[in-house]
Amino acid sequence: MTLVVYVGGARSGKSRLALERARAHRANVVYIATGEALDDEMADRIARHKAERPAEWETVEEPVELERAVAGAPPEATVVVDCLSLWVANVFETAPAEELAERAVVRAAERPGLTIAVTNEVGLGIVPDNALARRYRDVLGRVNATWAAAAGETYFVVAGRAMRLE
């Protein structure tokens, strides 16, 4: 059907827009959560995100095997991947994130149901002062570009407003 990507800064409203789009589509929803509660702050964020989702949505917590999670969703379901930036952080030191992203986006784009992906834009600020952060920024930028290239719709989100990218 359609792959939709929402990309923007932290707290820009990407996830809210993705949830609204999924609700409006009126299909069963599989929410693929890539974050892990490794500290109290992240546990609180995950709890807030869970509270925002309808109880009838299926949640798949998958921090690493994104391709498998997307492929495992029922074909006609709406899939929400939230988010690619956490997924890249989970895999980029131990696996070729760009290759994994290419395989996962093929699965997402070929699904008959709607797939919505959320990701952060981290390349608009200053150049990070350490090699690890620069590498993460570069890898995430390439992953975002891969998903955006495969998407039928891509939106840049700023202050809760979505601007369609062509």
Image (cartoon, rainbow, N blue to C red):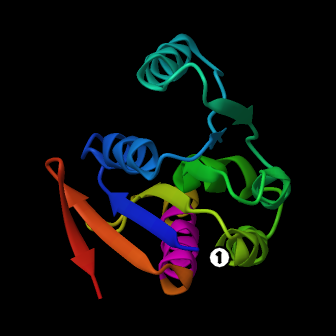
- Could you tell me residue 107's position as x and y percent? 76, 71
The residue positioned 82% from the left and 60% from the top of the image is 71
- The residue at which mark 1 appears reads as 109
Residue 126, compared with residue 89, is above or below; it is below
Percent position of residue 59, x then y:
68, 31
Res 155 → quadrant: bottom left
Q: Which residues are magenta?
A: 135-148
Residue at position x 33%, y 66% from top?
A: 127
Work out whether 22 lies above or below 157: above
Give the secondary structure at mark 1: helix
Residue 142 is inside the magenta segment = yes
| Residue 121 appears in the picture as rendered | no
In what quadrant of the picture does the N terminus appear? bottom right
Vertical placement of residue 103 versus 64, above or below: below
> Residue 86, position in %: x, y?
58, 46
Q: Badge 1: how crowded within 10 Å, few (<14), some, or many (20+)?
A: many
Q: Residue at x 67, y 73 (%)?
A: 105
Q: Is residue 20 visible from the viewing direction of this image?
A: yes
Residue 101 versus residue 81: which sits nearer the camera?
A: 81
Look at the picture and state if 108 lies above or below 99: above
Residue 95: image quadrant is bottom right
Give the quadrant of the C terminus. bottom left
Residue 70 in magenta? no
* Type of amino acid at the residue the image marks with label 1: Ala
Q: How many marks?
A: 1
Image point (80%, 61%), residue name:
67
- In this rendered view, identify the residue nearer to me: 94 or 84: 84
Would residue 160 appear left or right of 34 to someone viewing this image?
Answer: left
Q: At which x and y percent is residue 49?
A: 46, 25
Q: Would residue 136 appear left or right of 37 to someone viewing this image?
A: left
Judged by its main secondary structure, the magenta piece is: helix
Apparent side of residue 153 relative to residue 131 in the rendered image (left or right): left
